[in-house]
Image: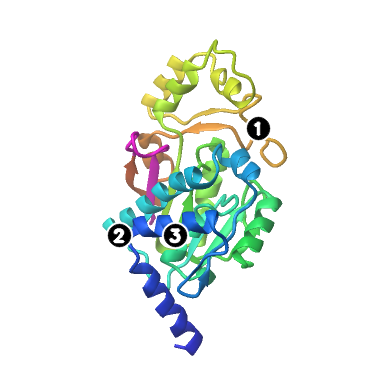
Amino acid sequence: MSASAFIDLLTMQDLMMQPLDEWFETICRSYSHPPTVVDGLLLPGFPPDNLQANTTGQTGVATLKEAFVFYQDCVETFASLGAAIQYEHTLLDFGMGWGRIARFFLRDLPLANIHGLDVMDEFVEICRNTFRSTNFHATPPFPPSPLEAGTYNYIVGYSVFSHLSERACAEWMQEFHRLLAPGGMVALTTRGRPFLYFCESMKGQGHTGYLGALSSMFDDFNAARSSYDRGEFVHSNREGVSGGGAMTTEFYGETFIPRAYAARAYSHGFVLERFQFDPPRQSHPIMFFRKK
């Protein structure tokens, strides 16, 4: 091991000694009091609050808390499934946005082993600047990606399979299979069944914009729930829930993937190890897959 690699390892060991709740406070401090250096590591900066709000609906500590819950669930569930994160492992944040998820994994992995992929050039540029890393890449909405096969031990995606079309989900799962090392793990969130009730509850409330679009994305919410309960892929790409630019209607909308569908549809390449959803704590269900 080189001297620089040994120093990096010592830094990682120091960071991993930090309890998860303290790590959350450290990341929050990097937002409120930048720049923040921990054990010689300069933590990534943040984009402006208006960009945070436009992409996650929240800013600062609130949006970091949501990201932290997902990060914590990934770390703990990977370990419980016999795939605990090790220093030498590599991770890909799929649809990384401005890097709110990826930054938490700096406790577990060296910066050189954390990568990101997004369809938005703006986010790629933000992450390259704030993380001071060229490991963030742009990709077309549909694969293949520009990344090397068999490279990653983990692929995580927060609030991405909550939006992709059935075709996009299927093709990206195939791409994940190509990108993962043998036995690699995937953690992806999707919309949960309770969100259908939330959207329906806004009908007739006079909402405009995105909330108004959510309230009318299905003509019959009961039918959508019935489809979900039958284990079917439920998706809407109506005006207002699909995005602009690369977020075309064939690619993007609102997506609800039930457990039965997740276990069946991707079984050619993956085992669904766990479908985890604790509504009081989690905003979205998490699907944990292992590459066959």
Location of mark 2 (residue): 79
Q: Rounded to the nearest whole Å, what is the CA distance between mark 3 and mark 1?
A: 39 Å
- Locate residue 32, reporting x and y percent: 53, 54
Is residue 245 placed above or below 268 in the rendered structure?
above
Residue in the image at 35% along x and 34% along y: 279
- Locate residue 101, reporting x and y percent: 49, 53
Disc 1 residue crowd, few under 14, some 14–19, many 20+, Cα 10 Å: some
- Judged left or right of residue 76, residue 176 is right
Q: Is residue 283 magenta?
A: yes
Counting residues from the start of the chain, the first of labels 2 and 1 encountered is 2
Q: Rounded to the nearest whole Å, what is the CA distance between mark 2 and mark 1?
A: 37 Å
Counting residues from the start of the chain, the first of labels 3 and 1 encountered is 3
Q: Which residues are magenta?
A: 277-292
Location of mark 3 (residue): 26
Location of mark 1 (residue): 249
Disc 3 residue crowd, few under 14, some 14–19, many 20+, Cα 10 Å: some
Q: Rounded to the nearest whole Å, what is the CA distance between mark 3 and mark 2?
A: 23 Å
SS state under label 1: loop
Counting residues from the start of the chain, the first of labels 3 and 2 encountered is 3
Label pair 2/1, CB-CB below 8 angstroms? no
Is residue 118 placed above or below 283 in the rendered structure?
below
- Locate residue 174, reporting x and y percent: 51, 51
